[in-house]
Image (tube, helix red, strand yellow):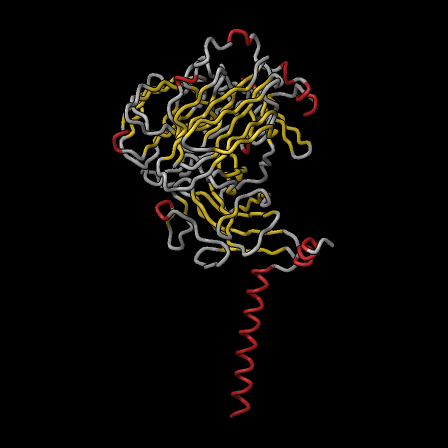
Amino acid sequence: MIIFKKKFRLIIFSMLGLTILFLIYKAIVPFGEITYNIKPCEKSFFISVLKPADRINGECSNIITGDPVYFNLNTPRTFDSGEVSITYKTNQNLNIPIIELGVLADAQKNYKLKPLENKIISTLNEPISGWDSMLENGITLWQRGKFYESIGQFLDNLNDIPRDKILTYYYDLPAVNVIPNYGNYLASSKTFPSDSIPALRGSYQFYTYLENEDLDFIFKFVEINKNNDDKGKIEVYYKNNLVKQRDVLTGGSIELTMENRPTGFYKIAVSASDNIITENIKSPARIISFINKINLAKTLEPELIDITTDSREIFARTIHPNSLQKILIGDEILKITETYKQFSALTNAPISNIKLAKDGVEIAGDGLFSFTSEAFYNPDYRKMDKNTDINTDEIDYIITTYDKGQSTDNWQTRTITFDLKNSFRYENAYGFLISIPGLLADDDVDDFIEIGEIEIKLKGRSIIAKIKEVLNF
């Protein structure tokens, strides 16, 4: 009996030891590569459940009913890349063409998105649809007919193709670098269009343009809660290259100047928390077009706000009860009747005007926004979104890195690789987002996406490689 008890204890302790060693291995990952996964109704220390709860349904909380949803990957160590595979299926009522997956890119909660599924491209059925495709080095060019024999030939002749005939999807064509007849845009005074820019909250980015002039901006930042030690930065990009950077300082003005700059478009990106308000922007620049989003700060004496945009769909939300209002978009009215809820409206126009009687509202869309029509200019090619109709919009070319693969009505698995070295990691976790633009949890439509499995293959340096790096071997 004593011998049996000793053997039993030995087995128990051995199993416990093996379990501890297995968990240590899963945490440390000594060889630099490991795979984590989670299925419905399973619990995982490494991959969290989907959230928030009001956009998730089902007994196992794996049915997505609203956009977007999030999950975290908890890792005690860092990795260089992650290959994320998602197995899912959609129900027959889901009439949303685009699904995307993203990884958290920075502390301001921006995500780097990649395409998971695009039914607009997937349903292009050549030759019945009249579209021809060619694939070169992971890039696909779709043509209505076959005018160009190679993607290189297409790229060499971009200047000969009307910009409104080209659509991009996760492929960046070189932006327009010169505005024809720029003399018509020259600033008439030091204050135009600066005086028309209202106070902005948090982060934003915009395009400006220089031609035989210096970059000259003055920003004034203030804090809402002075007890917070919030920090931020201003970055200037030219042709996607960082050319200048300044820290955001509250309580005073910050000059951002650069002399003898080459002609072209510049992107200025302000990264700041929602506790920081840009009270004023002054510049002689004629072009100031904000990219994708403007968060209008709440002020004591708001004035009528007029915005020009090329976004085909406008999203609006507010956290302030006294900012509830009717927004005029072209000739249509968008009612914001609740706080913390996003409202949207289609513009159905290449260029639209938005008018607001009150500030304290976040306005967003897949396009540019400017506070005067004269200051609006979009140097980018148009991007495909969920509202794209390639026939109505008379598109002749689509260029993309999206691989349409094989789509079925049942379970399907799609895999996307992310660069984790340049992703944001908070409290030992990488953040991920599943985006289904247009999927609403609080509508009366029974549409959803069901997740069958999430698998993440991680690659990084081995423990030996890390030791060698520390010891400079």
Most foreground residue, 384 or 366: 366
Query: Which of the 4 quarters of the picture holds residue 142?
Result: top right
Question: Which residue ends up furthest to the left in the rendered image?
Answer: 322
In the displayed structure, would residue 221 be above or below residue 32?
above
In the picture, measured across the screen, residue 246 lies left or right of residue 365, that is right
Question: Which residue ends up furthest to the front in the rendered image?
Answer: 252
| Image position, residue 325 (x, y; %) | 27, 26
Query: Which of the 4 quarters of the picture holds residue 121?
Result: top right
Q: Is residue 146 visible?
A: yes
Q: How many marks?
A: 0
Q: Residue at x 56, y 7 (%)?
A: 181
In the displayed structure, would residue 206 be above or below residue 81?
above
Question: Which residue ends up furthest to the right in the rendered image?
Answer: 473
In the picture, measured across the screen, residue 311 lies left or right of residue 239, that is left
| Image position, residue 42 (x, y; %) | 46, 59
Q: Quadrant of the C terminus?
A: bottom right
Q: Is residue 417 visible?
A: no
Most foreground residue, 395 or 168: 168
In the displayed structure, would residue 362 be above or below residue 283?
below
Most foreground residue, 130 or 367: 367
| Image position, residue 221 (x, y; %) | 42, 30
| Image position, residue 33 (x, y; %) | 63, 55
Q: Residue at x 60, y 28 (%)?
A: 243
Most foreground residue, 245 or 143: 245
Q: Residue at x 49, y 48 (%)?
A: 426
